[in-house]
Image (cartoon, rainbow, N blue to C red):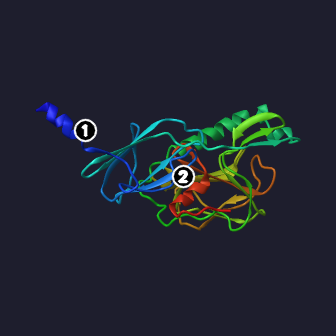
C-alpha cells in the first residue's frame, strides 16, 4: 500500500514548459523573471519559499554571477511542476579608468568608521525588503528620469588607476542637477538616507514580493521612510552627492539581495530603455 502511494506522488510531477506557467523574462544571469499562475499554491527555488500574492504573481531574480544549478518547484492546485536549470551566462565588459583622483579609488582611513555605520543603516533597511506581501508593481515600470544619457551600464567591472573594483550594480543616467527622479513603479520607502559617503542622498523602495529599487547621489530626497509612493511620482532630484564625479542618477534594482540589471524590470512589459 505504501509503495502505491509513493508511485502516485512521483507521477504527479511534470516538467515545466511554457504552456504550464506564464513567464516574462529569461532564466539568465542578472535577469528578473515575472511569473503568474492563477491556480498557484506555492513556489520554491531550491529549498527557499518564494513569495506570491493572492492572485498568483511571483518573481525570480538571478544575480550577476549566479552559476548555481537550481530546482524550481511550482505547486498548483492539482499538480506540482519541476524545472531544473542553471542561469545562462552573460558576458560583461571591463571598464578601465585612469587618472582618477585617489579619493574616488580608495576611501580615506579616517572615513571608515562613518562608512561602517552607514552600511549598518543600509543593512537594517534592506532587512525590511520582503515585508510588502502585495505585488505593487502591476501597473508596470518606467525609466526613473525623463531623458538623460546612459553613462554606465550594469555588470561591467571597473579598474580605477589600475586597481580592480567591484562591478557596477546599476545603471547611471547623466542628467543636470535638479532633474526630477521618478519612482519606477508603486512602492514603500524603506530608507531616505542623508549624504552617505558612497551613495550620497539616496532612497530605497520596496515594490513587493522581494523586488526593490534604489536611487543614489540625489541632490535632495523628497520622501520619508514609511511613505507609499506611486509609479511616476517625483521622489527626489538628480545630484552628485556621495562618491560621484558629476551629476547623475545611479539606479539600482534587486530581488531581495540578488543584484539584477534594472533594464530587466521591463521584461514585465517586454520593453527596454535606451
> Would you say residue 204 is visible in this rendering?
no
Give the numbered dot on residue 10: 1
Horizontal relation, residue 178 to residue 226: left or right: right
- Is residue 138 visible to us here? yes
- On the rendered structure, is 217 left or right of 127? right
Is 115 above or below relative to 19? above
- Of 147 and 193, the residue lying toward us: 147
Q: Which residue is mark 2?
A: 212
Q: Quadrant of the C terminus?
A: bottom right
Q: Return the disc, 2 or 1, that comes first in the chain's sequence.
A: 1
Name the foreground residue: 14 vs 253: 14
Q: Element under label 1?
A: helix
As drawn, 131 above or below 228? above
Q: Among all residues in the image, which is located at the extreme right?
A: 99
x 59%, y 67%: residue: 233
**CB contact under 8 Å: marks 2 and 1:** no
Q: Measuring from the top left, give residue 56's x and y in whole percent.
A: 36, 57
Marker disc for residue 80 = none
Q: Position of residue 61 (x, y in %)?
A: 51, 47
Residue 183 in percent (x, y) is at 59, 62
Residue 64 vs residue 92, the one in the foreground:
92
Q: Residue at x 39, y 36 (%)?
A: 47
> Whole-percent x and y of residue 72?
40, 43
Q: Is 51 drawn above or below residue 222 in the view shown?
A: above
Amino acid at each position: 500500500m505504501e509503495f502505491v502511494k509513493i508511485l502516485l506522488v512521483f507521477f504527479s510531477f511534470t516538467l515545466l514548459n511554457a504552456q504550464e506557467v506564464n513567464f516574462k523574462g529569461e532564466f539568465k544571469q542578472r535577469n528578473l523573471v515575472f511569473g503568474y499562475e492563477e491556480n498557484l499554491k506555492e513556489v520554491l527555488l531550491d529549498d527557499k519559499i518564494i513569495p506570491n500574492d493572492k492572485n498568483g504573481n511571483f518573481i525570480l531574480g538571478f544575480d550577476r554571477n549566479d552559476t548555481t544549478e537550481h530546482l524550481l518547484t511550482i505547486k498548483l492546485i492539482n499538480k506540482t511542476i519541476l524545472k531544473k536549470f542553471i542561469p545562462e551566462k552573460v558576458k560583461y565588459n571591463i571598464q578601465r579608468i585612469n587618472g582618477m583622483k585617489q579619493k574616488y579609488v580608495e576611501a580615506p582611513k579616517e572615513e571608515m568608521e562613518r562608512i561602517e555605520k552607514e552600511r549598518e543603516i543600509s543593512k537594517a533597511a534592506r532587512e525590511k525588503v520582503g515585508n510588502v506581501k502585495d505585488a505593487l508593481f502591476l501597473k508596470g515600470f518606467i525609466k526613473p528620469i525623463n531623458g538623460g544619457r546612459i553613462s554606465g551600464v550594469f555588470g561591467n567591472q571597473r579598474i580605477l588607476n589600475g586597481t580592480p573594483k567591484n562591478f557596477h550594480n546599476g545603471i547611471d543616467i547623466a542628467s543636470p542637477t535638479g532633474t526630477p527622479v521618478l519612482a519606477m513603479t508603486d512602492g514603500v520607502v524603506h530608507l531616505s538616507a542623508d549624504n552617505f559617503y558612497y551613495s550620497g542622498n539616496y532612497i530605497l523602495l520596496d515594490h513587493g514580493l522581494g523586488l526593490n529599487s534604489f536611487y543614489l547621489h540625489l541632490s535632495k530626497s523628497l520622501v520619508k521612510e514609511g511613505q507609499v509612493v506611486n509609479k511616476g511620482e517625483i521622489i527626489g532630484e538628480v545630484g552628485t552627492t556621495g562618491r560621484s564625479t558629476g551629476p547623475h542618477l545611479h539606479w539600482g534594482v534587486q530581488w531581495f539581495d540578488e543584484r539584477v540589471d534594472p533594464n530587466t524590470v521591463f521584461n514585465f512589459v517586454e520593453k527596454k530603455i535606451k
